[in-house]
Amino acid sequence: MDILTHKADGILTIEFNRPEKKNAITAAMYSAMVEALKDAESDSAVRAILFIGKPDVFTAGNDIEDFLKNPPTAADSPVLQFLAQISRATKPMVAAVAGNAVGIGTTLLLHCDLVYAADNAKFALPFAQLGLCPEAASSMLMPQIAGYQRAAEKLLLGEAFNAEEAREMGLINKVVPGDQLFAYAQSQAAKLVALPASSIRVTKRLMKQAQTAAVETQMAEEIKHFSAMLSSPEAKEAFTAFVERRKPDFSKFE
């Protein structure tokens, strides 16, 4: 199974489990996570959700080959359903990030309530490098969290940044030694479980409700451009260069 789910002690753990492909996410993996998140919403025994990857990789982002076969052109596409679920989740979500967190591996963190990273974590938002635009409302949430200049640097240049810089930007809560990460994140999730569930849900809703509509609007605007750009010459050049393992040449495009 490329996505492992486990319920225990009030925590639903969702684990990326495709290490041979650096946990690159396929449509089937998105669908599995959507079902797990829907189930968590309706299961009163689940009081917190924990996303984890492997000690050396969180996720490399979308599996490009699979993504091109299953582009997000309709509202019922698995990736868009996943984005809707994480943006509307009423229960607290915690993430433990080790190794690379690329693309949606970073943008999903913007919707989590607590995020912890190992000292080997590396984040990247390479949308522009692929001839695309941001998703998951990251074009709105990144400037809010990190400030416009730092968000512009990460979203326009798409260069990777480490865990300490992510902490300084406000993207993550704390940097934890790699061998302690999963246990620490689970202990933080357990603290949430031990608190009154209604208090946690209402507090989360109050913090997020002022921008709930704005997030949905931004996601819709992003995906409109994202879907169109998937078939652009720039994206085709970027993806072809990726497959051929060469540097893309965008000089011929205006």
Image (cartoon, helix red, strand yellow):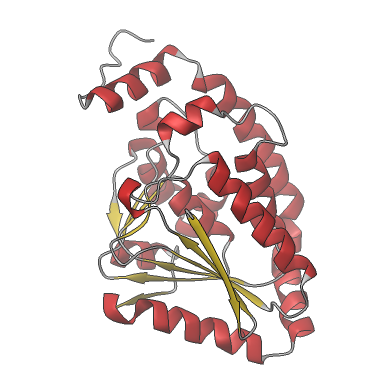
Of all residues, the one furthest to the left in this rendering is 246
- Residue 73 point in image, percent of width and height: 64, 26
The answer, for residue 120, to whether it is visible in the render is yes
Q: In the rendered image, which quarter contains the C terminus?
A: top left
**Whole-percent x and y of residue 169?**
40, 62
Q: Name the residue at 34% across, 23% down.
A: 238
Residue 208: quadrant of the picture: bottom right
- Residue placed most toward the observer, 164 or 69: 69
Looking at the picture, does residue 185 appear above or below residue 146? Answer: below
Rendered location of residue 122, percent (x, y):
30, 57
Image quadrant where residue 50 sits: bottom right
Q: Position of residue 168 (x, y in %)?
A: 36, 67
Q: Count the marks.
A: 0
Query: Can residue 87 be spotted in the picture?
Result: no
In-front residue for pair 83/209 = 83
The extreme bottom residue here reads 194
Q: Residue furthest front?
A: 1
Q: Is residue 27 above or below residue 35?
A: above
Question: Does residue 127 sit above or below 16 in this rendering?
Answer: above
Q: Is residue 207 left or right of residue 24?
A: right
